Amino acid sequence: MGVLLVLVCLLLFTRSREEFRQLNTHFSFRKTDKIPYGTYVAYNQLPALFPKAEIKVERNAPGIWKSLDENGRGQVLLAVTPQVSIDKTEVTALLRFVGNGNSVFLSTTELPSSLREAIGADIYGVSFDIFRQFAPDRPDSLTISLAIDSGKIPQQFNYPGHSIDMQFDRVDESRALVLGYSKNGRPNFVMLRIGQGQLFLHLAPMAFTNYFILHNANMAYYEKALSLLPASASVVAWDEYFISHRNRENKQSKPNWLTALMNLKNSEGKKPFGAAMWVLAGLLLLYVLNEMRRKQRPVPVIKKPANDSLDFVKTIGRLYHDKGDHLNLARKMAAYFLEHVRNRYKLPTNKLDQQFCDALHYKSGIDLSLILSITSSIEVLEQRTSLGAKELAAFHASLENFYNY
């Protein structure tokens, strides 16, 4: 019974391990990835195929290469990618590079329209995007063949992995040499001579993945396909620009609703909606900048506080002066003077004697003779019954001299 239980456990454990051993189907095409659909093997075998060449990695667009000399010759650019996104300027730079006496090997399932127009070819089949969207888990296999040796039957190669490949719909054999075929016998690998160089177009990039190359004897396909490139090449650059810029052309060919409206033309060929949108954007920007200014209420002008006590004294003085009551006005002026001395110099004013005058002279610094004149006038005012205008004016002048000092 115990032995039977152990056997059942081992069977379940072995089955569980088999269920977890699933194929990694991530389509990487990266030279550093050792997964089935990476290109680690293809990249690391380049030194053996090109022993005289310097192996480099190119991450820049055609025309601004760092590892390749656009005006040089005897160089090779090798690109393996499911999609190629390249504009007309880059196509021109790529073809000019080939025409100067260099070789470009491009393995992809989608040739951009600008490149198809340049070489006068068209392709058909299940593209990488369609396969990834509708049949990523479908059981599949890839069968391709090479027709390098003239007069011999094309040699077939296959593997049980995914068969994401395309075929040429039409090939001008006066311009292109067919080097390989797909499973249904349609061309999928051609070479075009441009100027002094060669352009290789290969429509089955899965053939350069780790899974395909390491399956059975498929290494021969890799070696024979790349043997068409000049063995005397001085530089072999592995391209990673196209890997990093997949599907750029498709994204640009699907504008959003705003782009469509901006490009909408009228009968005269103008774009009134686009112009209106730019004007609206400018007005909105102007409004935002205007609202960003600091808003502050105007600061009110603060008037200098008026001396109400002095105004009151002046008003009372004019009142007594207009009535001709000079004595009473002089007494009021004397009382204001004594109040000023008490508040300013903290001196008692009950006795206006010599001691008071000396103390006021010491604290105020005013001439002692002026102080004595004022105090004597105040004492006289207490005994007078009337006062003339000139005497009032003289007393007022004495007080003003004291205040002004």
Image: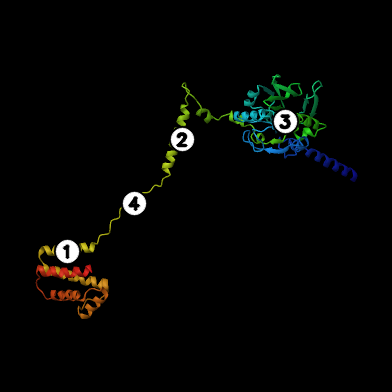
Are the residues at dot 3 and dot 2 in contact (C-beta closer than 8 Å)?
no
The span from disc 4 to disc 1 (Cα, nearest Å) is 37 Å
Tag of residue 281: 2
The span from disc 3 to disc 1 (Cα, nearest Å) is 112 Å
Side of 35 where 381 appears, left or right: left
Q: Amino acid at mark 3?
A: Pro
Tell me, yes or no, if residue 290 can be seen here.
yes
The span from disc 3 to disc 2 (Cα, nearest Å) is 46 Å
The local crowd at label 2, few if under 14, some if 14 to 19, many if 20 or more residues have their Cα within 10 Å, is: few
Residue at x 63%, y 24% (from the top left corner):
118
Q: Label 4: state its secondary structure.
A: loop
Counting the numbered discs, the total is 4
The span from disc 3 to disc 4 (Cα, nearest Å) is 76 Å
Q: Nearer the viewer, mark 3 or mark 2?
A: 3
Residue 363 x, y percent position in the rendering = 27, 75
* Viewport quadrant of the N terminus: top right
Residue 97 x, y percent position in the rendering = 65, 30
* Viewport quadrant of the C terminus: bottom left
The picture quadrant where one finds residue 48 is top right
